[in-house]
Image (cartoon, rainbow, N blue to C red):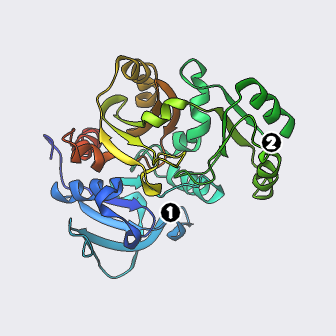
Amino acid sequence: MTKNSRPLKVAFQMDHISGLHIEGDTTFALMLEAQARGHELFHYTPGEISYSSGRVVARGHSVEVRDVPGDYYQLDDERLVDLGEFDVVHLRQDPPFDMNYITTTHLLEMIHPKTLVVNNPFEVRNAPEKLYLLKYPELTAPTLITRSEDEVASFRAAHKDIIVKPLYGNGGAGVFRIRSDDTNLSSLLELMKSNGPEPFIVQAYLSAVRQGDKRIILVDGVAVGAINRVPAENETRSNMHVGGRPEHIELTERDKEICAAIGPELKERGLILVGIDVIGGVLTEINVTSPTGVREVAKFGGADIAALVWEAIEGRVG
């Protein structure tokens, strides 16, 4: 633990721990580091948080973790806790960024900052990854947010090769590359419209993605590590769960410029752990909900980012 820190009561709001792939899971890395520092861990899922008579409570389990595939956790008996009595709550469930996700941020906002919520739930709610980057048009690829088929057609006419994806999706789900001669655009937009009332996001295709989609991790607004994710030969997406290959990479001067441009605001907004995606020197996403990549950076000899996150947290709570 850092100087003057003490054992903390820490809750993780996350998808159920039984479904983790621990070899590459950032939440698990944060749990391991917290336990190594002597902190007490509690685990609950997003469906188990409630508001009751002025308190924000959750039903879940105290948990111990170990870095052993197939035998990596042990849960105590289920119990109801008052989250306002905890020192830290990690907001770590995966998107989609839907109304349930938004509701949990409202509930957690009621206990923050007396209980430190990481990341700040007010700022998470106001920074969905594909929308937050619109604050920085000078750093990003040409981007369109719309439900209008005419607007998408005009955008494709201008940029020829485009990417179409859900505005609030995650993990590469529903990402399509549509070239200038592709006749499936109208059918694709009809399908996406049938999935809900939200607009979708359209971006100019960046051919540099064939060399990799770089995940850069920032702690308190400072870049602390990066990993490159190279898409499989016949795949547009670079996400590792669909075949993307992780590899070591260093930050370029352009990467440092991007981080310097956005880092101060991330820190000011209480976004302690953030992952940004950069393709060919172009910012494509700012991930503040449950950013990943911590274990991959460590595997390639990079910084112990989980430790850096906990030093930042302990500095605030201590």
Residue 269 appears in the rendering: no
Q: Callout 2, which amino acid?
A: Arg
Residue 221 x %, y %: 37, 29
Give the vertical position of 136 relative to 85 (above or below): above
* Residue 259 placement (x, y as % from top left): 40, 24
Residue type, mark 1 in image: Arg
Q: Dot 1, how many residues are within 10 Å of its Cα: few (below 14), some (14-19), or many (20+)?
A: some
- Determine which residue is flagged by label 1: 55
Q: How many labels does the image show?
A: 2
Horizontally, residue 112 falls left or right of residue 155, namely left
Furthest toward the right, the residue is 150
Q: Residue at x 49, y 30 (%)?
A: 208
Query: Sequence-wise, which precedes: disc 2 or disc 1?
Result: 1
Asked whether the viewer can see residue 20, the reply is: yes
The one nearer the camera, 300 or 102, is 300
Q: Is 30 or 139 nearer to us in this picture?
A: 139
Along the horizontal axis of the image, is 70 left or right of 106? left
Identify the element where label 2 is drawn: loop
